[in-house]
């Protein structure tokens, strides 16, 4: 249980350490949206709605990809790496 004295910064850092792919997903989302908004002025004769849909799909795809990699990494550390280390170390604790 989290203590009441815990500040938001330390809570955020704890969450980042637990799930390092969450900030990667957020940063990728912001980068893709920023890039697409910058590219909007040179979109040519493409409709605004089509451009916005492409931007949303790209940003969403990056976030879902980051979440998938995070889940796979978590599964790897929990089910493959940990049992392998316990076998090397002798009896599990």
Image (cartoon, helix red, strand yellow):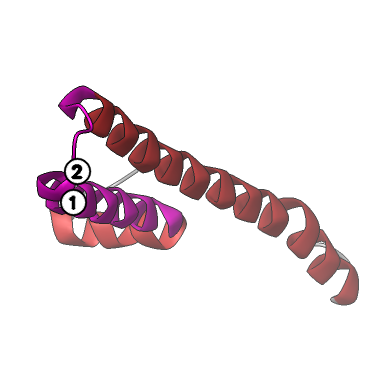
Give the camera-side residue of 39 and 31: 39
C-alpha span from label 2 to label 1: 6 Å
Q: Position of residue 13 (x, y in %)?
A: 28, 62
Location of residue 19 (image quadrant):
bottom left
Tell whether 25 sits left or right of 6.
Answer: right
Q: Secondary structure at mark 1?
A: helix
Give the camera-side residue of 42 and 34: 42
Location of residue 55 (image quadrant):
top left
Of all residues shown, which one is farthest toward the top?
Answer: 49
Name above or below for residue 26 compared with residue 81.
above
Q: Is residue 39 magenta?
A: yes
Q: Which residue is mark 1?
A: 39
Foreground: disc 2 or disc 1: 2
Tell whether 1 sits left or right of 44.
Answer: right
Is there any visible trace of residue 7 in the rendered image? no
Q: Position of residue 31 (x, y in %)?
A: 25, 56
The crowding category of the residue bearing disc 2, from other C-alpha atoms within 10 Å (few below 14, some 14 to 19, many at least 20), is few
- Does the magenta stretch mainly form a helix, a strand or a loop? helix
Q: Is residue 57 magenta?
A: no
Q: Which residue is mark 2?
A: 43
**Total marks in image:** 2
Pointers 2 and 1 in contact (CB under 8 A)?
A: yes
Is there any visible trace of residue 23 in the rendered image? yes
Of all residues shown, which one is farthest toward the front?
Answer: 45
Quarter of the image with the C terminus is bottom right
Residue pictured at 68% horizontal, 59% vertical: 77
Of all residues shown, which one is farthest toward the left?
Answer: 41
Quarter of the image with the N terminus is top left
Q: Position of residue 48 (x, y in %)?
A: 16, 28
Q: Which mark is residue 1?
A: none
Q: Position of residue 74 (x, y in %)?
A: 61, 52
Magenta residues (range): 20-49
């Amino acid at each position: 249980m989290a203590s009441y004295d815990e500040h938001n910064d330390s809570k955020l850092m704890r969450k980042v350490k637990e799930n390092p792919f969450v900030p990667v997903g957020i940063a990728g989302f912001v980068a893709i949206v920023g890039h697409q908004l910058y590219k909007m002025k040179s979109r040519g004769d493409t409709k605004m709605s089509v451009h916005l849909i492409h931007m949303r799909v790209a940003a969403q795809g990056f976030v879902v990809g980051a979440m998938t990699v995070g889940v796979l990494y978590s599964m790897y550390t929990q089910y493959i790496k940990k049992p392998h280390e316990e076998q090397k170390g002798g009896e599990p604790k």
